[in-house]
Image: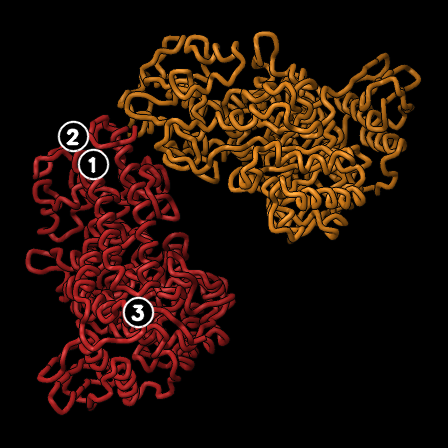
Chain colours: A orange, B red
Amino acid sequence: MGNFSYRAWFQPVGGFFAARALEAGGSFFFAEEECARGLRLYEREDLQVSFAINEALPSEGFEIKGAAGGVKIEGGCESGLLYGTYALLSRIGRGEGTVGWSFSQKPAVSMRVLNHWDNGDGSVERGYSGNSLFWRDGKIGYDLPRLRDYARLLASVGINQISVNNVNVRLLTAKLLTDEGLVDLAKVAEVFRPFGIRLIIAVHFDSPVWLGGLETSDPACEKVATFWRETVARVYKKIPDLAGFLVKADSEFQSGPNAFGHTQDIGANVIARALAPHGGTLYWRCFIYNCMQDWRDTKTDRPMAAYDTFFPLDGKFDDNVILQVKHGPSDFQVREPNSPLLGAMKHTREALEFQISQEYTGQQKDLYAWAVQWEEILDAPFDENRATRELIGREVKAVIAVANTGDDENWCGHLLAQANLFAFGRMAWNPAITAREVTEEWATLTFGRFTAEAESGFEKTLENPATVSSVTKMILDSRHVYEKYNAPLGICWMVYVHHHYGPSPDGYEYTPWGTYHRADHVAIGVDRTRNGTGYTAQYQPFVRDLYENIDTCPQELLLYFHRLAYDFRLKDGRTLIQYIYDTHFEGVEGVEKFIATWESLKPDLPADAYESVRERLAQQLKNALEWRDVINSYFYRKSGIADEKGRMIYT
Amino acid sequence: MGNFSYRAWFQPVGGFFAARALEAGGSFFFAEEECARGLRLYEREDLQVSFAINEALPSEGFEIKGAAGGVKIEGGCESGLLYGTYALLSRIGRGEGTVGWSFSQKPAVSMRVLNHWDNGDGSVERGYSGNSLFWRDGKIGYDLPRLRDYARLLASVGINQISVNNVNVRLLTAKLLTDEGLVDLAKVAEVFRPFGIRLIIAVHFDSPVWLGGLETSDPACEKVATFWRETVARVYKKIPDLAGFLVKADSEFQSGPNAFGHTQDIGANVIARALAPHGGTLYWRCFIYNCMQDWRDTKTDRPMAAYDTFFPLDGKFDDNVILQVKHGPSDFQVREPNSPLLGAMKHTREALEFQISQEYTGQQKDLYAWAVQWEEILDAPFDENRATRELIGREVKAVIAVANTGDDENWCGHLLAQANLFAFGRMAWNPAITAREVTEEWATLTFGRFTAEAESGFEKTLENPATVSSVTKMILDSRHVYEKYNAPLGICWMVYVHHHYGPSPDGYEYTPWGTYHRADHVAIGVDRTRNGTGYTAQYQPFVRDLYENIDTCPQELLLYFHRLAYDFRLKDGRTLIQYIYDTHFEGVEGVEKFIATWESLKPDLPADAYESVRERLAQQLKNALEWRDVINSYFYRKSGIADEKGRMIYT
């Protein structure tokens, strides 16, 4: 225990950080201790660092000044000192000097949250990195040194809230609210507290029945309100700094206020009012849709569901409710427009939810850069004046993501998938940072100092810039490479039902999940304009018009909004079908390039890191070939239109 | 325990038969006791029945003579007396007199076998009737009175061998061969022995490694041969009348001789030679194919696999090996031709394997008469001189089926699915019996005597002949009704992968299972003639020519053997696509008729039986509607050809 050899930023082989016990606990001195530890890691014990709280700075903000005599870190609070410390270490870790360096930062948003979808039995829903870091055999059960290392990873990129149980709450994790569960959870809180990370509990809407012995969970029932008040009071006695609760209600067979004939605000507010006196936040997920749809029904359009459900309730939610909105209206697909609900509610606080776990984007077998997609999402217009990025810190009060971590030695299954966890924290802190910047940062911290000769040590200067730039390029390219061999132009969902890996073009076509492309021998897609389901009307007028019009709709979203014939001409003159064939061949070529790049880096990489990624890339190539051939065959069989370039398409 | 209210032939509500202990044990007196019990059931205690062994009769055969003074049953052995007894009870149970009745029978084949696919944890693979009757929590564990009732059900239709563990042997059931396992199994053998039923053990090919501590299971290794010899000797000490072993080797990830570079005969013979001195039979399954096929590969044709594997080995198997051949070359699909391997091997003993469990035929939610399909299979020509039926008792030495039973109160999940278990036993005994005869027998024994007024008692005469004939008609119609709404004309496999219920037309299309229809916008099917994969050449010349030629190929198998355009004209002038639309609308109408029929029978049926079947029929209607609409939409989308009758096809 505690003798890990995982490899991650700030986590050299051998578990340097993990070796020492951590007793300071949430004090001023903790930043100092973290700093000293980091400087030892980089053999910079000579550097003098002083710390001071400066209440004039924003909370969690910091200011660093480097001079010949040393570095001074000022923080708006203790967490600010810690973030300043990690910023300093990151600079040193990337081989930069500190003399004459001056730097100040504050987070764009005060809630930077990770949701773990960990089950009580130790499994992780949509987890591709081993088992839970928090749960074993039905109870909280963790490896303390490893959990501290995890806390450090999260804090070092600015994450300050986490939930440790799945939003699909089942009985085992529902019991977190019992006295026994709280004793266990309080121990987890203790581990994360010095790192400035507070806990959230995912709770079941039916807790009043499951745990309170009541006959109903009806939020309008006074006994239910009393249950929540008493329960929350009990919780806060054990964990006074708890960030709040998280609820997935009326969604995918989970209970909720609808079951009792109430709207969402009624369900949320009864819990929020119990949390309010303790300063707790209620995160209320907006992932609500009809998951028992009849595929024959062409009027119901699943992407419209969240907006239809929540927008009419604007202003009805209590102040400490945050509506947690997935970035897109579908479900973390490789390509979808932004959710029209984001920023739409002027009198309701919202959170933007990402998924770091690669549920539909290669499951950490395939390389996939979420940062690139997130940048696109943030760049996308909210209206004629603002990019979506500018909602953050205003309408959007929290940035949240589903974690991609587990007890695999490299945390994320795929070593390079760490870049996604890193990027999430950095982009939640600073949405203006680019995917390139954040990926370079990660690649430098992780691979920048290794050489084949000095695997276990750390060099003072960046000895292998080519490795860093190659790895960065691979990662940055990976989102579009993956998209190329996946379902085309925003079609989504061409995966195997339930497990969500590998191509099954009609897999979701006749299911109750509301996920249809309705491809026939002539055309594919659902018309979501005013002539079709009318979904576009949910957007701000500027964006609505953009998507509504086939000429202004971004090409990559064409099939999300429009039904098009296979011989439809794209702007570059290619037909839609030819575009599909071309991109699918290119996708495979992209993976082949990754492999060639990676193999060329072998001399510069530690052997274990090289091998583990090489193995994943080989799996990815197999997957990409399968996607290419299945998708191409599917469309060829449907359309009968041959590839203009005469490449192999299986009949 | 023992206080069942299940309803089945010879098993009135209240568990009459189950109430008394069974001690006689395999003796002459057992038939007498069974007879007395049965006569009490029918309130015919007045009937004088005498018993005598007559060694001039065939083993298991019997002769019954009824006169005014009573009935005389002679049997070729004790089992013959028992079968005679059940034949007498069946006659009485169907309201027939016995005076002047004379009747003799012998089974067409001496091995009439049921394979249970029961797992050690109590689950049943492809079981749709609750949990195992034999296994609980990793060990043999049963309800004794119930198991006796089960033995009676099986013996009453002539089944004389059963295996009680899954052919996919896992560690729990592999342990049947240990001393501890054998003690448990010997107890099961005791229950079944008086009913003339012997046990078979499904064994794992790697038992020498799993249980014997050897480093290999290589059948050419002398230590492995010794392991099998010693193990079999140990087994026969505990269960001296064991019928033999059953092995699924080199199939769907199970180990086998191929793994050691040997052909199937080498693997089979080493075990068979261990069994031979004890009179044991080795059942060796022929369900071998490449389950990791590349869908792009159009040369490999899964239906050819069993013949290709086994035919060249004709004559190489020891005499006590029986090759267990599934009736069709695919996998118990709703429509497939007979396996070309059946009867092809002149120097090798074969078994014909059916499936009573409705894996691909409605999973006991949908009504499905296997008897009708089995009759078609037996009617189908083996060559120009013989129907397949005539192989039985000649090339085919055993008739075997996968059971459809479990611990559901009505044994089979769907009450009417009992007719399939009944029919299997009766048709294995006498392959010349028609589906109509056997179904009427079952319906009369099960429903013939009930009236709404006297639910718990038994009437002396058939009071509701209309009910019996309506139920019989429903069951007889059900095979073709199901086929109509399923995949058309022998296409097979249009089901959800793995769980095998509900329509997923492309579900298996890009999988590694070797199950492809390759539908495009013009045509569907795989050409299996000499112009295609060449599969037809595996048949006897007469049958080969029949299937080879599109004009002589039976219409219902057209798409099994030929690739046809959607506008291909069938003999009645309809296009293929129109036939698909028509049959799918008719299939739903068929289910609607079942419901109307069943509802009309309500006054004549016990309430519990009525309700349980009505509920299943409602599920079936939902399933049929789903099949109809998905299949029709699938083909409409592919072909763009409209229904001539303008009915609703969803686009």
N-terminal label among 1 and 2: 1
Q: Give the residue pinned by disc 3.
A: B8
Q: Secondary structure at mark 2?
A: loop
- Label 3 Cα crowd, 10 Å radius (few <14 / some 14-19 / many 20+): many
Amino acid type at mark 3: Ala
The residue at which mark 1 appears reads as B581
Alpha-carbon distance for marks 3 and 1?
38 Å
What amino acid is found at the position of numbered circle 1 in the picture? Tyr
Decide: is B101 above or below A337. Answer: below
Q: Residue B172 in the image: state x and y as whole percent.
A: 49, 65
**In the displayed structure, would residue B266 be above or below residue A238?**
below
Q: Residue at x 29, y 26 (%)?
A: A638
Q: CA distance from mark 1 to mark 2?
A: 9 Å
Measured as percent of width and height from the top left, residue B647 is found at 21, 32
The residue under the point 79% across, 34% down is A195
Find the distance from the CA under tag 3 to the CA under tag 2. 46 Å
Are discs 1 and 2 both within one chain?
Answer: yes
Discs 3, 2 touching: Cβ within 8 Å: no
Do callouts 3 and 1 mark residues in contact (Cβ within 8 Å)? no
Q: Classify mark 2: residues with Cα within 10 Å, few (<14), some (14-19) or many (20+).
A: few
Q: Residue at x 32, y 73 (%)?
A: B456
User: In which image quadrant can residue B242 be found?
Assistant: bottom left
How many residues crowd mark 1 within 10 Å: few (<14), some (14–19), many (20+)?
Answer: many
- The secondary structure type at the circle numbered 1 is helix
For the point 88% across and 17% down, the residue is A56
Q: Is residue A11 visible?
A: no
Percent position of residue A566, x then y:
32, 18
**Between disc 3 and disc 1, whose residue precedes?**
3
